[in-house]
Image (cartoon, rainbow, N blue to C red):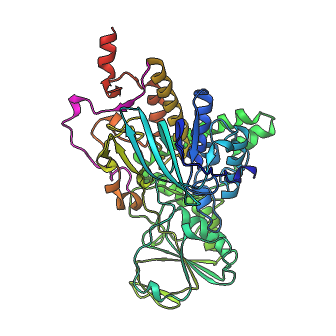
Amino acid sequence: MSATAVAEPTASTATTHFDVLIVGAGVAGIGSAVHLRQQCPEKTYAILDLKDTFGGTWATHQYPGIRSDSDLYTYGYRFKPWVGPPIASGGAIREYMSEVIDEYGLARHINYGHRIGAASWSSETGLWSVQATRSDGSAAHFTCNFLWMCQGYYDHENPYTPDWAGADQFSGLLVHAQLWDPQTDYTGKRVVVIGSGATAATIIPAAAEKASRVTMLQRSPTYFLCMPNANELADRLHLIGIDEETIHRVVRESISHDFRELTRRCIDEPDAVVEELKELIRAHAGADFEFEPHFTPRYRVWQQRMAMVPDGDMFEAIAAGKVDVVTDEIDHFTADSIVTKDGTVIPADVVIAATGFRLKVMGGIAFSVDGESVDFSQKVAWRGMMFSDVPNVAWLMVYFRSSATLRVDLIGDFVCRLLNHMDAIGSRQAEVRIPEADAHLPKLPWIEEENFNPNYLKRDLDKLPKRIDRIEWRDSQDYWYDREAWPQIDLNGPEFVYDGVRASKRVTEAA
């Protein structure tokens, strides 16, 4: 993978200027760079990343069986056909990204080993000043006209682990999945995976291949979607000789359509969907598989993300007797076990906490605008990608029910259209402001818990920006709405402000 080579840091601390600075060399940052190259070819740009390689989450996570929880036809980029199985390993995804980096000549634009500490905007100069520290300890200074924040939404260094009583007395290995060392040998050992989401569903079948016993310990159940790790439509189109670009486009649309229908049915006929999910599980676990108490969630289907189980591998491991399931809360650890609140003792040599992550809005960077510190938790998010009164910044927050990369493509189109519009009208500063007619509306939490309520969002909800009761001032989390609405966004609408003047006023004065 030639693209893994680390960019050589420069010795100078002189300020380097780019038209656009992209933060993050993960799936979002790499995809955004391609869109910028394609749609704004005259713009200079650079990508900064804390890590010493590309990949983002696929470089962070190295736990057993690491794989996607979305199909690669929609998780892959629209401009780069995916040609492997729909659910792909972390290594395959990084290979795909490496090809994108090579094909679009991105490597020379990526600056690895850069930790950004602060970003300050000056309306006087129309520039962001970005202060970073290289991995060798030297300082790096950048200025840019536009900041494209693609660094992800969670803390890559400090995952969420509950404070379990007696955990410090455990004599085995206790590690969060996010911090797993792939060199760890757990052959023949008793492995306990704490969690019930996509990470747990990935680790459990992989660990069962080597461990003497695997126990899934969950506080509450999750909905699982068992599906073949193949796409019948893609296979058929390959068979009859259709080109890869067409296959990728058609299968991508087909999968998007199917998930839109699934979303609708989860709202309109949730009981029927739950029964269908059970039937898919029974196909792998057996007709007499019991769902109570371990596989009956307490929330409405699709109120949290479903966990993909390709080829039903986790349930086949359960049916084969390789995996036990315990549903209860942890009371305490002992030297060699976990004791649950109902008194169940689970022997363990290795405990992997698949307990989620901590949100980290805008990379935890200290932002300021004209000398005033920016508290993003008090800003209102415009369509989930810009912030009220913060100039020349785009934020890439992922979809939670749909593939994250679908949003990369949509935001890529919008940002490039905005940049080209700014050039056309001669503006160096663009921001969004709540229209005066809506200024009285209360600021509400970023998510509506009745609609979507995973613990990792609820736990850190105070860190997220606010919304108001207007469709454009909330994150719809609806790919199908966004793909229709965003291309129609009026860049001279009442929320847009260019060089300190509302667009609507500029248009009126020009007329």
Q: Is residue 251 above or below residue 507?
A: below
On the question of residue 285 being in view, the answer is: no
Q: x, y percentage for residue 51? A: 59, 57
Count of marks placed on residues: 0
Res 283 quadrant in image: bottom right
Q: x, y percentage for residue 474? A: 35, 40
Q: Nearer the viewer, residue 36 or 309?
A: 36
Per the image, is 428 magenta?
A: yes
On the question of residue 144 being in view, the answer is: yes
Identify which residue is drawn at 57% across, 65% down: 201
Identify which residue is drawn at 65% across, 75% down: 208
Q: Main secondary structure of the magenta part?
A: loop
For the record, the magenta segment spans 426-453
Q: Is residue 411 left or right of residue 100?
A: left
- Quarter occupied by the C terminus: top left
Per the image, is 376 magenta?
A: no
Q: Nearer the viewer, residue 189 or 127?
A: 127
Q: Residue furthest top?
A: 511
Res 187 quadrant in image: bottom right
